[in-house]
Image (cartoon, rainbow, N blue to C red):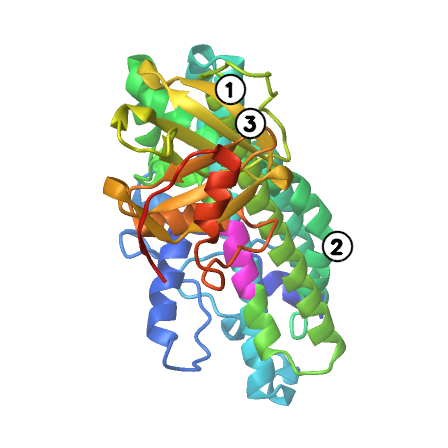
Amino acid sequence: SRTISMISLSLSLADSQLYQEYSEVVQNREILLSHSDSLSISVLLHPHTLSKTNPFKSLNVPQQSINRPPSPRLSISASSTTLWQDLPGVRKSPDLEELTEDERRLQEVRFEVVTSEASCCRSLDIVVENFVMSKQLNVILSSQDKNWLFSRLNDVRAISHSFLSQLEEAVEKDIMRFTVCDIIIKLCPRFRNVYVPYLTNQSYQDKTYQRLMDESHEFRRVVEKLERNPVCQRLPLRSFLILPFQRITRLKLLVQNIVKRTAPKTKDEAQAIKAMKLLEKMIQDGNESISQMKNIESLVTLNAKVDFECRTLPLISQSRRLVREGPVTELRDFSLKDREEERNVYMHLFNDYLLVSLRKEGGRFTVIDHAPVSELRVENCRFKLHSLQKNLFHLHMPQKALLLRTDTQANKLRWISALSRPYPEIDFSAVQGMCASCFKRNCSVKVNILMLVI
């Protein structure tokens, strides 16, 4: 009955291990289980935890030291070894004998979603109440630094508690055959609204943390003091900040395991596959958002370093990304008798535009020309010219044509590949001498061909 289920699962959330410990134990366990199809889907305590029954007791800390909101229903404990099959409500159920071994394994995996979420909730409670809500840190941190450092942690905590509460309710209703993927599907829109922005903020979070630790003695002192609070169990602030990254990845792996163990061509399998795809899409969206944020950062940085000798081009755009950059040598006179007739230029190739610049002191650039990628054409030159030897290619821009040289053959081929993506590369091996006649026609100079390279 439901009453028996509630009694059998009435363990304290305060006793569950921290998620950091859970993750390490699970990873170690999976290494051992990689060659076995064992039923051991358990949540073990970290080997450094002194008490198997209560991590707070071993550290002489009252359980009330973290005033987290109590769970309205069951709260899964990670004390000792918590297996679904070992719960009193399961052991005493007459339905246990009716379940096949595959069905029992499936319930263990589902149960791990519940126990791991309980650990996640506990770690999130600690980071919010011990760090985010710290009066000492709030005095030190500016509003911007606090936002970058703890962005949306309160929201992550709230959705984690909501998820756990619904998981608990599902177990209470049917401890023998509860499911979790339907809950994940229902909550995925909320997961996305919270986790994707948190993932996107990662670079700002890392930079802010490192800057404050390096430049603010007071911040370092307070953080180290808060980390010594026994509720943190000697774990640093950073391990709490990365918890949402670990959790969403782990949840996807658990659902993949559920898909693997669910009977094929059933409603449960369709539901599990849908949950898995939603989580995969959310993680993909997070990665794309991170990539876009890094692109914007790099554009902002570059924009501060460039001056335009030609018509100004607004650089910062959400759709613009850097494809390739680097130095090349521009050959300005095909007689090639005077090496001063060549100059070093620097190219920034974006997905939509190419910038050709001269490098200046202090890491600055003077843009001398730019063109849309759709208006570029590149030709591979398979010949040697006097002392220049090889590694030449011809770049056609709307207003001019450039003969360019790279330091290596591999570098030349990479540039040609990157620049010619909108167009197929011209194959000069079929028509010998085409490069020479092309250069003569466009640049009105004589080219002395010593050797044709096929």
Q: Main secondary structure of the magenta part?
A: helix
Q: Which residue is mark 1?
A: 303
Q: For mark 3, does the 10 Å Cα neighbourhood hold few (<14), some (14 to 19), or many (20 or more) residues? A: many
Give whichever of 239, 136 is nearer the camera.
239
User: Residue 196 lies in what quarter of the image?
Assistant: top right
Residue 5, given in percent of the width and then of the height, sits at: 64, 66
Residue appearing at x 70%, y 65% in the figure: 274
Tell us which disc is closer to us: 2 or 3: 3
SS at mark 3 in the image: strand
Residue appearing at x 64%, y 40% in the figure: 374
Name the quarter where the C terminus is drawn.
bottom left
- The residue type indicated by label 2 comes to Lys
Residue appearing at x 48%, y 52% in the figure: 434
- In the image, the segment drawn in magenta is 245-254
In the image: residue 228, left or right of residue 375: left
Structural distance between the alpha carbons of marks 2 and 1: 43 Å
* Label 1 vs 3, first from the N-terminus: 1
Residue 354, given in percent of the width and then of the height, sits at: 54, 33
Q: Is residue 251 magenta?
A: yes
Residue 379, given in percent of the width and then of the height, sits at: 49, 48
